[in-house]
Amino acid sequence: MKSKNSSRLLLAFLGATALVVAACGSSGESSTTETAAVTADTAVAVDAKPFDGVTLTFGKAPHGEDEKANWEKWLPAFTEKTGIKVELTQVPWDQLEALYTASFASDTPYDVSYQTSTHLTLFGERGAFEDMTPRINGEDFASDLQNFPAGVLGASTYNGKLYGLPFVVGTIAMYANLDMMKSAGVATVPTTEEELVAASKAIMADQKSKGNKDVLGFYTPRTVADYGWYFTLASVHNRGGDFLSADGKTAMMDSKEVKDSAQVAVDMICKDKVQPANGLYNREAAIELFKAGKLAFILDEPSRVKTFKEAALPFAWDIGMPVGYNGKATQFATTGHWAVAAKSKNADAAWEFVKWLSSAEFNATYNQRYAFVPARLDADASGGDEMLARNASWVSVWDGLKTSPKVSQLLDEYAKALEAATSCKTSVDDAFASAQKGATEALAQG
């Protein structure tokens, strides 16, 4: 996608050439040398890179172990187009807030960084990021802006300010071992909580009868370390609830919808025993169990589609939506954004980078690898993969995280309560009463 500046230079070149040709036609006396000189001078202008020599710093937490290697393949095309060099720093997810806080407090913050809904407004309200509202309404972004749904932009806007341009919308997939299902007489991938528990029990019993006593029914993260809130809050939304009021002022951790959802998670571990106890397996270990044919169902991100296909799993498998409740199933996840540092000394070059990152072309490239849903409508992230195309369609029921300055603190309270309750040592009521207290105190702070 050509930048506005490049288009204008190209038009200038065509106009200059036309004038030279017209001059030759009218008098027949314009010299070949003069024509060549004008054409050569204009060609230099066409090839000129408006930000040649600028170096940007770029901070991003990785979506896969291969991401750094992929950026090494992707970034040269941007440098070739603009002259801008980009220095990538991978920011570990478990150190993200601390490392970003230090960077944005310094005089040389990352010029561009990747921010999810959890931290976008937290840092933005502290003055770390440029408000992109004027940028996206500029002439050079007009043709792109029409491809960003108002709902996606709205969920990323806080008090009229857009601190980062949406890039990806997260979704979650239920991975199912079809061979295990067939053996146990389970006809379809479960679509409700009750179906999931029943199918898990049937498969575990069937496998046990065949001598496979260590096969488990279901796994999804319920701990703080593995972002249990990310994989559980869809259940709250399916019940029509949330952990925070619509105006962002009141904590709702002890609401019926939150506690009923948590009780289902507790029962799967503590009563029905279709999910292993917290601490027995972490998220990556559970993925390996699924790959080894030791786990019937696992809830995880759609990025696993590509890695599972590359691994050539020794059984038939498929993906489905996360299970619903009472006829309602939604997709809960965060949104990923590109943010420009307010203190960047190369803000215009940083915006040029953000435009490139947010283009339909790069959206397709990135998301055909990591299987998120592009935040813009004209980017195909499926790459012809039927599973990923199905995943992309699920954004129609997306009911994800809306950004706010305290959302990260509140999610931490929710996650701690969920982990405590699913430990089978603390009641749901007690765990979420504590979360309500912590969340209320966090909201009361300036």
Image (spheres, rainbow, N blue to C red):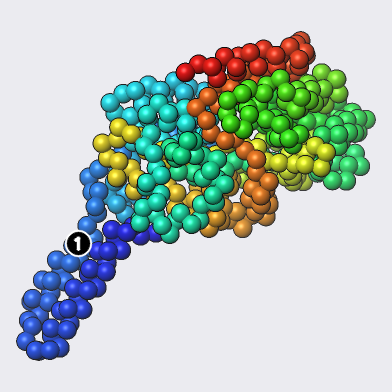
The residue sitting at 44% across, 38% down in the picture is 161
Task: State whether residue 42 appears in this view.
Answer: yes
Q: Position of residue 350 (x, y in %)?
A: 33, 42
Q: Position of residue 170 (x, y in %)?
A: 59, 41
The residue sitting at 47% across, 32% down in the picture is 120
Q: Position of residue 39 (x, y in %)?
A: 16, 71
Would you name the residue on which mark 1 appears? 45
| Quadrant that contains the N terminus | bottom left
The residue sitting at 35% across, 34% down in the picture is 341
**Vertical side of 207 occupied by 251: above or below:** above
Residue type indicated by callout 1: Ala
In depth, the one of 390 and 324 nearer the eye is 324
In depth, the one of 393 and 305 nearer the eye is 393
**Vertical side of 268 occupied by 331: above or below:** below
**Vertical side of 85 occupied by 118: above or below:** above
Circle 1 SS class: helix
Q: From the viewer's perspective, is 279 left or right of 377?
A: right
Q: From the viewer's perspective, is 365 left or right of 182?
A: left
In depth, the one of 446 and 197 nearer the eye is 446
Q: From the viewer's perspective, is 126 left or right of 188?
A: left
The residue sitting at 10% across, 80% down in the picture is 32
